[in-house]
Structure formats: structure tokens, C-alpha cells
Image (cartoon, rainbow, N blue to C red):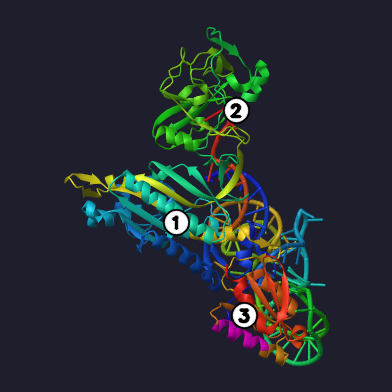
Amino acid sequence: MRLSTYFLPTLKENPADAAMASHRLMVRAGLIRPLAAGIYSWLPMGWRVMKKVMEIIREEMDAIGAQEFQLPALNPIEIWEETGRVEAFGDTLFHVKNRPLVLAPTHEEIFTTIARDNIKSYRDLPQIWYQIQTKFRNEPRPRSGVIRGRQFFMKDSYSFDTGFEGLDKSYGLHREAYKNIYSRSGLNFFIVGASSGAMGGTGSQEFMVESQDGEDTCALCDECGYAANLEVASSRLKPVGRLGISNPVEEIHTPNIKTIDQLAEFLKISTERLAKSLVYKADNSAVLVLMSGNDQLNEAKLTAALGKTATAMQPADLAAFTGANAGSIGPVGLKNFSIIADKRLEDANELISGANKDDFHIAHIDFNRDVKIDGYYDLRTIEAGESCPNCGHGLRIVNGIEIGHIFKLGTKYSVSLRANFLDEAGAEKPIVMGSYGIGVERIIACHIEQNHDDNGIKWDKSIAPFDVHLASVNMDNKDVVAAAENIYSELEEAGMEVLYDDRQGVSPGFKFKDADLLGMPVQVIVGERNLKQGNIELKIRKTGERKIFPMGQLLTELKTLLKN
RNA sequence: CGGGGCGUGGCUCAGCCCGGUUAGAGCGCUUGGUUCGGGACCAAGAGGUCGUGGGUUCGAAUCCCACCGCCCCGACCA
């Protein structure tokens, strides 16, 4: 491709509204342009990268026997109502105004419908189906360039099996395929246990790329390899437990005490036996959640424990429900609430909590004597340095960007959409499903996050838009031009993808800067100086290493460099 | 949704607080010339409803109100 005729608008200056390096560089290098918040146009250079990533995905999916589909993004809303996901997605689901249609944020419903209508027998199973398709999600706050957009490409696949054994196999195949996809895309990544969230199902794992700007937080054990999203991560923290004596409950006056720290200071005790009360609303019922001291409630864990989404109760509602203000709520004598507590508080006694009366707390609470706890669950958010649940080594906490998620769905969708099959015995059973997603843009953004410097992108050969960036230093010099033209056709004939900077009247420095910004793995530089000696110069973008050698060796040299 | 910031040629920004010539700079763009190994130089040009609407005023990019758009933080700690 000749740069003189290629549509490639590069920018010298950083776009004002891009915070992350990948975002800045994708705009500067002419890969993308913003159209609206969370919506991007892919320019020719960017689209080349996208297609390469998609091709890697296709190859690895096909290799596990998956079959590619292309499904509609416009879906009848009725199908989404059948699975209850119109409500589950809420405002995130785009609705079409003048038809009863929605823009699909994912495709469980449609693939399951196809399976329902066409798979009748165990003989038709297993199946793995996938597509690479635009998804639409009305994100409340798009951010970080293409990493969280309102429209994005997702590779989504779905497995259909006769039972859970088959599901485990399909899930395992995906796990391996995903590892290959991310490795081939040149990413450093790790896999964590994850929450299934609104998708439902029996288990899931996420593929993560470590990044300060990541929206997810993960706990990692460098000793045994334990890795989990904070939404599910646990640690070995000793329970609060029982003290020898169990005094009768006693109301204590605690004027103007609002926080756990103030209370601990006021009573001159540690925070551990202070049972913090949090009030949540799930559907229309009120839930009191008890945590030890300053332990942080993890809402994802709460949702998992309750089996439904809970939201923090607003202060106004709170007073109406309890008669007390924030800071004074407690479990003793509380009516019309279900009460759950964090595992650390199981069977504990000698606790202090709110009295449901402003400026008062109750001391010497024994959970086995004074309160009816409806259940103990792991609800707390773990913190860095706590002990690994497997081996006891200190846990590290890092931020990550989720680049893929695999789910064992089970029968949630097949049951609600009646996707059944007849087994060997002629019994009708729901198909057992898995669902597996990859954010295609995120692979590109993360690749740039992991492969760039101040001057620009440093592509791996695997997804680089071109293999070679050929630059002729001076287009006014006939010999230089002739040599560059020769090299251009020679490399193209050898099957290499070459971006040839043949622009007239562009200074050498300008060309070099553009080459570094665009980031092709190898730069071939044709200049007067070396040409006179019959030499050619080559620069490896990743290392900055330069090589000068006789022209005749160029092709062999390039082939060696581009092999991996 | 809550909080903060921003909106001025294609891009990055100054001017606004304290209203008053013809609204500026750098980059980019056009034309001519000189250059040609790390974002060259000279000269001449083109290009702006100052986000939109309303208000105050003799006069608004500048002050006030509303709306729109974009970015960032937050949306457990009662």
C-alpha cells in the first residue's frame, strides 16, 4: 500500500479527550475516529487490525469444531421478555422506538431459539456455534476509548450438550481456544474465577489483562496461582468468633457517633466486634446485612447470596423502614427485615451494633441468642496482603481489563425458551448450554497498552496492519526512488504486506516519526547515504535496533525477522 | 443517576475573572521558492454561526438562565 494514496490521517498532537495510551494512539495513528460517546468509526488502518484479530479468532474457533453464524442485531422484544432479560438488562438494553424490537447486547436468546426449533434429538448434539457480531449496550458511562463502548464487536459462542459432562468438555475446549487466541494476539493475560452475574449459570472464568486503568479488580496468589475476580475472591481471615463470657444485652448512649471508626474510638475498642449494619432493598423486601467492623460489603457477592439484585437503600427510605437514621441501625428487635451476615460473624457474641434509635447502640449482642440470622455468607471484599484461601501466601490485588468471559450456563435459557431434546431413553430434557464471549476491540486496545512507547505503537507481527514499513528518505533523488520502488515490488511479490511511504515533499524526520507512531514491526529505510554503498537499513520497532547490510540480503533478513 | 471539568478555524489551545477596535497563536491546509537522515525554512493565502437558544446591556466569546454535547471521578461503609 502506498502511503501517498492511503487514507491515513495521523495526528501530531494528542487528542484532548483521550486519557489512556491506547485510546490516544489509536486516534493519533489513524485507526479510529470518535463519532459519539462510546461510538467509533474504524478507519482503513484500524480495520486491517480488526480483521486480523477476527481471523485469529475464527481459526481457533474453527479448530475446536465451532461453526460460524451471523445473526440479526435487531431482535423481537418478546424473545427477551421470555427469559426475563428485558428487566435484567434494564436501561442497558437499547429499545427501538417505532417497532417492538431491541438491539441485541448478546445472543443467548436467538441462538437458543434456533436450537429449540431445530435440535430434537441427542443425536444432534453436541454443537458449538459462534459469530463475530456488533453488540449494542447503552452503557451509562462509556469510557477508555473502545474499551467500553455502546457499540462493539463481540465474538460470542454457545455450546449445546446433552448433559453437564458434555458442558465441561465444551467449556474446556473454549478455555484452551481462548488461551491460543490471546497468546497469538500477543497479550500477557491471566485467568480468574468470576461471578456469573446477570448471565446466570453454574460457573465462569474471565480472561484478564493487567492494567491500572482496568475496571475489574482481581486477587492473585503468586505462590499457588490462585486467581479470582474480587467479586468472588476469598481469603483466610479468622472469624470474629466467641468470647468466653456472654453478658446480657445493654443499651449504650453514643451521641453523634455515625461511623464505625468513631464508634471504636468512642468505646476504646477495636472495630472487629462492631457489627456494621447495611440496609438493602431486593425486590420489595428489606434486607439487613451485617459486616464485621470496616469490612467492605461486596455487592456482587450479596447478589449471589440473595439470588437477586439488591440495591442500597436510600436514606429517606431507611428512616421510614426503621425509624432510625444511618449509623444507628442494628439487628436487635428489628422488624420486617430479613437479616444476613458475613461468614466472619458466624456464631459470634459480645458484638455491638445499632439500637434502631438515634444516638444509641446495643452491646453484648450474641448472634446465637439475641438475633435470628437468616444466613451466613461470604460477603466481604478481600484486601491486599490477606492470605490465599488455597496456600496461605499473601494475595496481590491488581486491576484488570476483561478481554473474555466463559460461562457454564446450564439450563437457564433452554428451560425458559423450552429448548429440549429427547435422550436415548426417549425422555425430554433441556439442552445444557455454555456461553463464551470475547471483546474484539479490547484485544486491540490491550495489545497497544502492552506494546507502545512515547513515540507510538509497537505491533506484534500477528496483528500488525502491515508487516513492513518501507520509507524512502528523499523522493527527489531518482536513485533512492528507484531503489525503494524495487524493494516495494520485491517484498509484495514475496507475499509481505508493505506500507510504502512514497510521499513527496515530506521531510525524513516526519516520515520516521510517522513510522514509529504507526508501529509496524520492521521499518525498511531507503536513504542516499547507505544506497551509495549498496546498503539498506532496517529498524526493528520493538527494540529500536538498527541493521545496515547489503541490499541483496534484505529479503532473507526480513523473512527471518518476520518468522515469529 | 450524583459530582467535577470542558465546548473558540481541521487539531492543540490562549482570550472570558475585570463586556468595548477587524477574535489570536502553534500545528495542519493551499500556492510559489529553498530544503531533504528524527515532526525543515521563507513568502503569500484560504479557513471561525466563539456548542445551541434565550436574557441583561448602547454594546456579549466574555455576565445571567436553560438546553445540548464531550471527558473525568463516583454510584458499598448506614
Residue type for callout 3: Leu
Q: Position of residue A138 (x, y in %)?
A: 46, 54
Badge 3 marks a residue whose secondary structure is helix
Residue closest to the eye, B47 or A475: A475
Is the residue A391 above or below the residue A176 in the image? above
Q: Position of residue A381 (x, y in %)?
A: 55, 34
Q: On the picture, is A69 further left or further right than A389?
A: left
Q: Quadrant of the C terminus of chain A?
A: bottom right
Q: Which residue is mark 1?
A: A177
Q: Position of residue A515 (x, y in %)?
A: 67, 73
Badge 2 marks a residue whose secondary structure is loop
Q: Are marks 2 and 1 on the same chain?
A: yes
Estimate the spatial distance between the alpha carbons at disc 3 and disc 1, rounded to whole Å.
33 Å
Mark 1 closeness class: few <14, some 14–19, many ≥20 residues within 10 Å: some
Residue type for callout 2: Asn
Estimate the spatial distance between the alpha carbons at disc 2 and disc 1, rounded to whole Å.
42 Å
Q: Chain of mark 3?
A: A
Instruction: Answer with the quarter of the image where residue A373 lies.
Output: top left
- Principal SS element in the magenta part? helix
Q: Residue at x 46, y 50 (%)?
A: A405
Residue type for callout 1: Ala
Instruction: Answer with the quarter of the image where residue A252 lies.
Output: top right
Residue A83 seen in the current view: no
Which sits earlier in the primary sequence, circle 2 or circle 1? 1
Q: Which residues are magenta?
A: A483-493
Q: Chain of mark 2?
A: A
Q: Which residue is mark 3?
A: A555
Q: Which residue is mark 2?
A: A294
Mark 2 closeness class: few <14, some 14–19, many ≥20 residues within 10 Å: some
Task: Kindly indicate whether the residue at mark 1 contacts the one at mark 3 (C-beta within 8 angstroms).
Answer: no
